[in-house]
Amino acid sequence: MRTALSRRNFFNQSFGLAAGGVLLRNFGFKGRSRGRGLSTPLIVTSHPNETGRRAMEVGWEILSAGGRAIDAVEQATNVIEVDPEDMSVGYGGLPNEDGVVQLDASIMDGRTYNAGAVASLENIKTPSSVARLVMDRTDHVMLVGPGALEFARSFGFEEEDLTTEKSRQRWLDWRENRGDDDWGPPDHLRGLPETEAGMPRPSVHEHGTVNVLAVDSYGDVAGITSTSGLSWKIPGRIGDSPIIGAGLYVDNEVGAAGATGRGEDVIKSCASYYIVLRMRDGRSPQEACEDALEMIREKYARVNPEFMPGEKFVAINRAGEIGAAWSYSGGRPTMSIRSADGPDTFTGTNFRTGED
Ligand code: GLY
């Protein structure tokens, strides 16, 4: 249908082409910012808003009382998941094509080298806590769909409608304008003559996610990634967030990394694992986040030299250094952080434009 086409064309003209010019000038930027070091214990989130700040206070209460990083990240993430205003995570997250909210989340505990995840989970506001139970109470790592829901119900989680008036309205607006051609080739193959001919263009989708990472006073590291995933996704689509190594990775000897952005790119690049490996090799969290964006750029450049996807990475190491980088067409990523130095924010670098 024409509506979807024209929306996409508008998007390309407004952002894609403008960004293309910038891309050519700035690729190759990396490692200019050294990130920042703080005292531990420490908790950070990719959410810089008021809810993110409140979440950090909840996590900090646990950490400052000598609690574990794994408990701090779970309690902090819950604050963000239940916020009805946040349309990228938990309750009020943007629904799939059918108007149903399907949540993905993962948790990893560096101390125990254990992990848990849920994907396509419906009707439960706090998927990270279900992921925690998968980690703690089973020898599995990931439960999906109805199995994950049944597992949550068996632990007393109550089923609730996760759509809010606002998120439902957004879905209705999208449905009004959608066409039969909403799904097409992946972004990096669009514009290439051999792919483009006769292929539909997808409509504009949104993807938001929260990462919460912490180091506790024992030096143990933990992390969570939680999301409602890509808006208007095909039912059953699973992004990077519940996949250990893609949307989240923790190594107690090194640190932790989390991803936000188009999950398909992050899955293919195993980005969070890559960031932790880079830190293990001596790169700062800031440099490691930028290294991952460069790695992704290189991979796509072999197929489409003009293409750079929009991803956001955050990382901490066990010494309390933090880093963040994204590759969106403007601005810089900001994190909320909490340590003994008080509440604070950290602004990372824009890999695409070179802003730091
Ligand atoms: N990064 C969230 C998603 O793509 O599902």
Image (tube, rainbow, N blue to C red):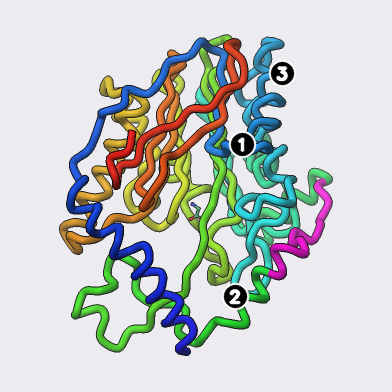
Residue 26 place in picture, x, y as percent: 21, 45
* Residue nearest the observer in this picture, 43 or 69: 43
User: Circle 1 sits in a helix, a strand or a loop, which is it?
Assistant: helix
Identify whether 123 is placed above or below 50: below
The residue lying at 41 percent from left, 19 percent from top is: 36
Amino acid type of the residue that numbered disc 3 sits on in the rendered structure: Glu
The residue lying at 45 percent from left, 76 percent from top is: 7
Residue 122 relative to residue 236: left or right: right
The tag earlier along the polypeptide, 1 or 2, is: 1
Q: Where does label 3 land, which residue?
A: 61
Residue 160 falls inside the magenta stretch: yes
Amino acid type of the residue that numbered disc 1 sits on in the rendered structure: Met
The span picked out in magenta is 157-169
Residue 258 place in picture, x, y as percent: 46, 38
Q: Is residue 140 visible?
A: no
- Magenta residues: mostly which secondary structure? loop
Residue 285, by quadrant, is top left
Bin the neighbour count of mark 2 within 10 Å (Cα to Cα): few under 14, some 14-19, many 20 and up: some
Q: Where does label 1 land, which residue?
A: 135
Amino acid type of the residue that numbered disc 2 sits on in the rendered structure: Trp
* Residue nearest the observer in this picture, 310 or 271: 310
Q: Where does label 2 land, which residue?
A: 174
